[in-house]
Image: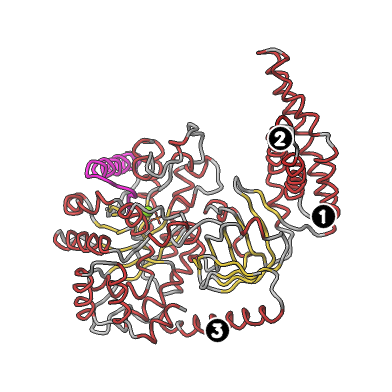
């Protein structure tokens, strides 16, 4: 069987499927024979924990509102002992060697199918109650992360198959174990795809129902460039995919020489290329790929999978210092947390507002949580004594926010000085990723030491296209005339005020688009480390003067297709083929 999705991280990965379901970590995989009894014990323990919890809930409800209201939990307690549920799941573990979470899910599917066939509406409704019990048992199976521990013992290479894969889940797993990621949802600029490219793991997104049709343990061959996923491939297909793997390796090898070469256009315009990274340990990879600095460190990745302590000043200081020292003398630009309330490792009020991408997020959240912001700023200012560091604020939408954030930096510096710490001057900049910021870039420039254009969000908010939704990914069009005009506007505002401006969104990593960006007057870019050698190769073949003519033409184009056509003819056809590979 072959599934087709969006290739979001090029490369070939071959391995056995490991399944992960929403509300992670709910992993589905086959266990070795020696682990079968351990899985059955985990299931039994989860049943007992569920029983205690249900009994407590039932007693509480009976005490407060009367025994007649507690009957639903009596029914759930009985379900825990129904032979079709836990006993059946244990049987599945034995016969199919599935982990406990997958086995109980399969047992539930069997029961649900029976209920669906029932004529009696009352009985059909009981499916929801069984689902509740199953959810509780699964939650208790997850307690203590036993399944993640168990997964450590599985033989690799593995391909992670998920309905939706959040970057924080990836951050908790051992990436080295994965040959590829494949997901039902997601798109090119979804953070998981960005992370996959950054850590060089092939990935395919937008497969819709892969996590449903792929069985745990089955062999998968994934092509992260074409978006193909071969399920249980026959030997001939596997040979073909392996041949592609060799071609890909040869192609990457051919770019090695560019790592050490300067990024300069054919007519001598010096370009600054930096790396986007998500972990302080990625600095080495950034340097090896030929990056001059770190143009974007997404500091919120420090919080992924960690508890409240990750927000502490010292923990952050240690991480930022490690990054700055390992990149020195190269410059490091650290973006303050770009998360919504729900992504903070602390209790936040429940409700949709806590998750909303247009709610309390980025710099707004930092300003609303003064203590948290001060701790991050102090950590950053202290780390700045260890190497060149710049602070950058995400999701700024107006001048007042930038001013308030700058005042917060000032306060953090005063606190440190009062403690007797030295605070070096630190440039403070702003991400241009909200349309209002782009259109007032000239005003923001008065209060900013630098700009970095976040095209990932800028495109989604300018075009009103959710960057994470694969169903509208063909409308997510970086070459839309609105985007090109907006980029020119920001580039001009920065030039007129003489402040540096870079592009750190994924758009910069497309070597064909780079020529256009250079033509628009942009000379600083930050991208995944793996994209840097190819970007250097492309830049060294471009003449800035010709790129300017190209940019002028694209500014007159009426559609993205016309812009694409202009770019295609600008980049020699043979070169474009290589770049697309
Ligand atoms: C952007 O929005 O372009 C960006 C670089 O930030 P992120 O992808 O983390 O939103
Ligand atoms: Mg952004």
- Specify whether residue 417 is painted magenta: yes
| Image quadrant in which you'd find residue 96 | bottom right
Residue at the spot 23% in from the left edge and 84% down from the top edge: 267
Residue 56 among magenta residues: no
Q: Quadrant of ligand 1?
A: bottom left
At mark 2, the secondary structure is helix
Range shown magenta = 391-420
Cα separation between marks 1 and 3: 39 Å
Circle nearer the N terminus (2, 3) = 2
User: Residue 385 versus residue 491: which sits nearer the camera?
Assistant: 491
For marks 2 and 1 on the same chain, the one whose residue lies earlier in the sequence: 1
Disc assigned to residue 124: 2
Which residue does the numbered mark 3 point to in the structure image?
A: 247
Q: Which residue is mark 1?
A: 35
Nearer to the camera, 487 or 70: 70
- 508 to 115, vertically: above or below: below
């Amino acid at each position: 069987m072959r599934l087709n999705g969006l290739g979001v991280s090029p490369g070939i990965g071959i391995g056995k499927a490991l399944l992960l379901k929403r509300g992670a970590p709910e992993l589905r995989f086959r266990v070795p024979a020696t682990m079968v009894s351990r899985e059955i014990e985990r299931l039994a323990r989860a049943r007992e924990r569920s029983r205690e919890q249900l009994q407590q809930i039932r007693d509480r409800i009976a005490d407060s509102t009367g025994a007649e209201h507690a009957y639903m939990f009596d029914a759930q307690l009985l379900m825990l002992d129904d032979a079709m549920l836990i006993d059946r799941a244990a049987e599945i573990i034995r016969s199919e060697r599935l982990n406990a979470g997958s086995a109980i899910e399969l047992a539930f599917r069997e029961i649900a199918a029976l209920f669906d066939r029932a004529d009696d509406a009352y009985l059909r409704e009981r499916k929801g109650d069984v689902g509740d019990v199953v959810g509780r048992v699964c939650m208790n199976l997850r307690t203590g992360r036993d399944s993640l521990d168990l997964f450590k013992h599985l033989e690799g290479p593995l391909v992670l198959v998920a309905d939706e894969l959040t970057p924080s889940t990836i951050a908790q797993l051992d990436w080295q174990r994965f040959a590829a990621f494949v997901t039902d949802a997601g798109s090119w600029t979804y953070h998981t795809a960005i992370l996959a490219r950054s850590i060089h793991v092939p990935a395919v997104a937008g497969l819709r129902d892969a996590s449903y049709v792929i069985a745990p343990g089955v062999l998968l061959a994934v092509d992260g460039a074409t978006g193909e996923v071969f399920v249980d491939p026959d030997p001939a297909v596997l040979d073909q995919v392996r041949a592609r793997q060799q071609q890909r390796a040869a192609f990457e090898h051919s770019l090695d020489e560019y790592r050490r070469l300067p990024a300069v256009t054919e007519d001598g315009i010096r370009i600054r290329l930096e790396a986007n990274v998500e972990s302080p340990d990625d600095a080495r990879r950034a340097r090896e790929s030929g990056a001059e600095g770190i143009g974007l460190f997404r500091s919120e990745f420090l919080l992924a999978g960690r508890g409240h302590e990750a927000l502490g000043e010292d923990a952050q200081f240690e991480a930022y210092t490690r990054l700055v020292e390992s990149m020195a003398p190269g410059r490091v630009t650290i973006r303050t947390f770009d998360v919504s309330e729900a992504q903070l490792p602390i209790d936040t009020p429940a409700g949709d507002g806590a998750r909303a991408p247009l709610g309390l997020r980025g710099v707004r959240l930092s300003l609303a949580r003064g203590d948290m912001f001060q701790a991050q700023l102090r950590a950053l200012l202290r780390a700045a004594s260890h190497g060149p560091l710049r602070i950058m604020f995400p999701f700024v939408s107006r001048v007042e926010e930038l001013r308030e954030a700058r005042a917060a930096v000032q306060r953090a510096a005063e606190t440190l000085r009062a403690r007797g710490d030295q605070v070096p001057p630190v440039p403070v900049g702003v991400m241009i990723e909200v349309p209002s910021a782009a259109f007032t870039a000239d005003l923001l420039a008065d209060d900013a030491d630098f700009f970095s254009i976040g095209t990932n969000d800028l495109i989604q908010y300018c075009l009103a296209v959710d960057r994470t939704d694969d169903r509208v990914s063909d409308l997510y069009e970086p070459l839309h005339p609105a985007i090109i005009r907006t980029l020119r506007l920001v580039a001009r505002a920065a030039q007129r005020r003489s402040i540096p401006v870079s592009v750190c969104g994924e758009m910069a990593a497309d070597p064909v688009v780079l020529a256009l960006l250079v033509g628009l007057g942009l000379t600083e870019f930050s991208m995944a480390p793996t994209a840097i050698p190819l970007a250097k190769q492309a830049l060294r073949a471009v003449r800035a003067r010709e790129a300017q003519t190209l940019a002028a033409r694209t500014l007159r184009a009426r559609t993205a297709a016309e812009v694409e056509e202009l770019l295609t003819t600008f980049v020699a056809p043979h070169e474009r083929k290589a770049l697309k590979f």
